[in-house]
Image (cartoon, rainbow, N blue to C red):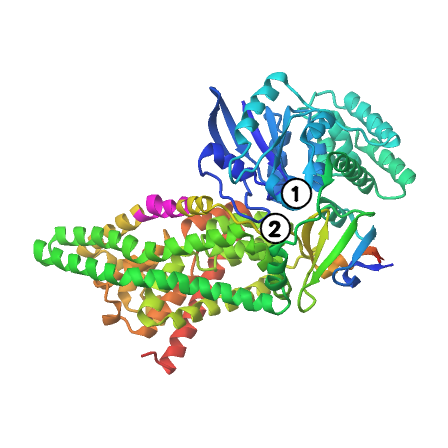
Amino acid sequence: MTTLDQVHENNKAKVIDIQGGQGIRQRLGQMGIHPGDTIMMLRYGALRGPILIEVHGSQVALGRRIASRILVEEIE
Amino acid sequence: MRIALAGQPNCGKSTIFNSIAGYKAITSNFPGTTVKYTETKTHIEGYTCNCIDLPGTYSLTSGDPAELEARRHLLSGEVDVIINVIDASLLCRSLELTLQLLELEVPMILCLNMMDEAQRKGIQIDAPKLSNLLGVPVIPTIATTGKGLKELFIDVLRVREEKRIGKTPKFSKDIEEIVSQLDSILNSEWPVKEKVPTRILSIKLLENDEFFINETKRNSNATNRIRPLQEKLEQIHGSPSDEVISSERHALAMNLFEKVSTVIHPPKRDIRITIDNWVMHKFFGYLILVGVFYGFFNFIFGIGGYIEEPLMELFDYWIGGLEEFFGKGSLALFLFRGVLQGIAGGIAIVLPYLVPFLIGLSILEDVGYLPRVAFLMDVFMHKIGLHGKSIIPFILGYGCSVPAVMATRILEFPQHRFIVSILTTMIPCAARITIIFGLVAFFISPNAALMIFALNILVVAVSGKILSTLYPEPGSLGLILEIPAYQLPPLKNTLKKSWYRIREFIVIAWPLLIIGSALLALMEYGKVDLYFNRFLSPLTHLLGLPVSVGATLIFGLLRKELSLIMLTQALGTTQVLTVMTKSQIMVFTVFVTFYIPCLATIAALWREIGKKGALLAILFTLSVAIILALITHIFFGIFPLW
């Protein structure tokens, strides 16, 4: 188990848990990110900038801090 | 009859709205273009209806102010039919909102928009089956080309007549039990029949939605009975109650999605992915960013400068002719010269730069480049205590400060909205850009104009740092932003949008320019302008500017363009260089770029961040302007410009 910001580019990961309060769960849930969902890591931004992921067919940019709160399991 | 267009951000609500309203709502390819509702009267098959275009909302749970606005309308009980617009290529996620809208028990119709995009992704959707499952009509459309829209609005009438409210899908049994328990509590404790069904109220209360909890507190004494039920949910499922419900809804949406859609082929190898590999690249992305804006700059200056010069000469010639015709010093000369200079200012100075600028901005917006800029700039925005999404109001600020201030509604945190609202007013809007181009680029050099833009960005960044230190936002989560696919918008839409914005200048600002210019001429005739100039002389003296520019700065508060047009009027010539040195032009432009926002912007600030915020913005920008103009004055005093 790792956090989303540690997943390598072009790898897929399954969300295990979102650590944080209702606010963060809600915002992520609205983007289609819930425990159980599969996320594909598309790219990292420069200088620890945001990451770009694909989830349910849409692309979402997430700040690293938020990404580090999403616990995931990498899928081979 | 009231029809509301509701849906998640960037699914094409405003495009559909415009198809029946004419171009009334700005459309762009980024989530959150619409931040307040637009309403229009329209006729469908002889029926008169009011159609409202709502801001996009991901769900019916509290979010940013734009989302709250959408929810307020949907819950008002005054909507007769909801058109739920869905980006068909993002069906699964979009259905989560659909499920919540169905709970409102208002006649509804589903508009599966962007079918072309879904097709490109290889997704085939069985619309009749979806319609069967949800109990509402489902109409596939492509809003940008108008495909399916006629059928959509005809079906709206049918839905209204039949009062088809659709089926509310059921959660798992244990959740349904708790929902109905709360439902009956609410029914007995809250005797006033609300406009909103108690079922959705129960669900939202179990989700611990702040807004609904507060509403319940105000209206009934059922609040203390909510928590035990939430706890019960938490016990059964082992996660917080809001997560239980949202996961359940998510599962329902996925289930529906799987039933009605098939992936017929893997998404075609898309050129857009290759483009993004470059545009969002760690290194090349930034090179492209600089290139795009540098190219944009040269595009505006190239076109504008080419047109400004001959037109100015022509108007100078005519203005000279007036002098011969009316004789020196006559009232008629002052008046006609004032009017002619106002007209000249619009045609020769403003429009040559404004038109290419607005067309360029529309293209950047419609293609979908702005969210990418937000992605690239996020890391730098963090350095000044904000995050990437704030770049969108900033970029809109280059068009006009008013929509830019309003666009801060897409930001989640009040402190960010406050800071970004003030900062966007310092971004040179189209009017001030015209001044920078028309004065500095035209009379000094394009590079000097670029320097002003660079200085501006630096100052905005430093101000951002200062403000975010003074007003920190402890709860900031960081960036969460959807990056939509690139679109090649029909050129017609882009041009319509540009025209919509240019028209604003022609019908509102230009008449003001002409009146203001004539007024200043009359003031000169009666020597009243001297009072204004004397009043501002401490400032003009401090900055080493001609005393006669004083009055122009006051006029600039009405419309920023006035400062420039009045300048030629106040100086008595369009050959500015004969009466002002290049250094003075720089000082004047720097001051005008930063000082006090125009009246319309102050009003917008007042609405968005309150009286105190507006006042702070005025004081802040004025001090920044004076300090910078003074530094510029001293700098060019030591290194004069030739």
Q: Total number of numbered labels?
A: 2
Location of residue A12 with respect to B623 vertically, above or below: above
Location of residue A26 with respect to B182 vertically, above or below: below
Residue A12 painted magenta: no
Image coords of residue B385 (percent x, y): 63, 62
Location of residue B309 with respect to B630 vertically, above or below: above
Left or right of B187 in this view: B6? left
User: On the image, which quarter does residue B173 sit in?
Assistant: top right
Dot 2 lies on which element?
loop
B317 or B222, nearer to the observer: B317
How packed mark 1 is, by other alpha carbons closer than 10 Å (few <14, some 14-19, many 20 or more), is many
B352 or A25, nearer to the observer: B352
Left or right of B299 in this view: B403? right
Dot 1 lies on which element?
helix
Q: Mark 1 points at which residue?
A: B89
Residue that appears at 59% across and 68% down = B284
Q: Which mark is residue A4?
A: none
Left or right of B547 in this view: B74? right
Q: Are marks 2 and 1 in contact (CB under 8 Å)?
A: yes
Mark 2 / mark 1, whichever is N-terminal:
1
Q: What range of the chain is rendered magenta?
A: B500-510
Q: Mark 1 lies on which chain?
A: B
**Cα separation between marks 2 and 1:** 10 Å
